[in-house]
Amino acid sequence: MASIPADADAAARRGPVPSLDDTIALATRIHAGQMDKVGEEYIGHPLRVMAAVAHTAGPAGVDAYAAQAAAILHDVVEDSETTLADLAAAGYPPDVVTAVDALSHRPGESTRDYLARVAADPLAVVVKRADIQDNSDPGRLARLPADQAQRLAVRYAGRRALLDDLVLSTRGPLRGGAQG
């Protein structure tokens, strides 16, 4: 008798994959009561990141559902008691759980090590680029005190440059691109 492959067995135990609406509802519950830097409900950030990756996933060669699910969930492990095992048990596919893992900054982890983990996962890269873009949005930063806005703009520009460098070193030069 042939055994069922581990992945098929896990998928059968998981049941149906949560819809994006289910995923938004989960993230909304998890982030309830959390506020962002400008004093708005935190859930707005993952929703904006999800909307951005809806447009960038296809051109980046990653699955649109997986990118959107990882985007809306990208801060749940880092900012709550939710675990990767909880996400897997809820039925999220392994690529989504792996991307959320890559996107979750671990205590004591350097920014370089964190972004190196992100750079190794194409799905996480798509989400992190959208995350950085949202966090450095000039319209949102303008609502902060000038010194804080400037500090955050510099931080996120540096993180974007480091991520791009790490992606390039992980995957090699882009076709037709130059290394520099």
Image: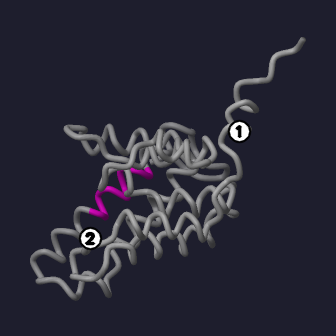
Seen from the viewer's position, the closer of residues 25 and 139 is: 25
Magenta stretch contains residue 18: no
Instruction: Describe residue 135's horizontal placement relative to residue 110 as left or right.
Output: right
Q: In the image, is residue 76 above or below residue 122?
A: below
Q: How is the image coloured?
A: one colour
Percent x, y of residue 177? 59, 52
Q: Amino acid at mark 2?
A: Gln
Q: CA distance from mark 1 to mark 2?
A: 32 Å
Percent x, y of residue 95? 61, 44
Q: Which is more N-terminal, label 2 or label 1?
A: 1
As drawn, the label of residue 11 is 1
Instruction: Describe residue 13's horizontal placement relative to residue 46 as left or right.
Output: right
- Taking the spot 35% from the left edge, 79% from the top edge, the residue there is 137
Seen from the viewer's position, the closer of residues 36 and 121 is: 36
Percent x, y of residue 149? 18, 77
Over which residues does the magenta segment extend? 156-164
Label 1 sits on a secondary structure element that is helix
Label 2 sits on a secondary structure element that is loop
Instruction: Describe residue 37's horizontal placement relative to residue 89 as left or right.
Output: left
Quadrant of residue 157 within the rendered picture:
bottom left
Q: Amino acid at mark 1?
A: Ala
Name the image quarter holding the N terminus: top right
> Dot 1, crowdedness within 10 Å: few (<14), some or many (≥20)?
some
Kindly identify which residue carries mark 2: 34
Seen from the viewer's position, the closer of residues 110 and 159 is: 110
> Dot 2, crowdedness within 10 Å: few (<14), some or many (≥20)?
few
- Taking the spot 37% from the left edge, 63% from the top edge, the residue there is 30
Percent x, y of residue 118? 44, 45
Q: In the image, is residue 168 above or below residue 23?
A: above
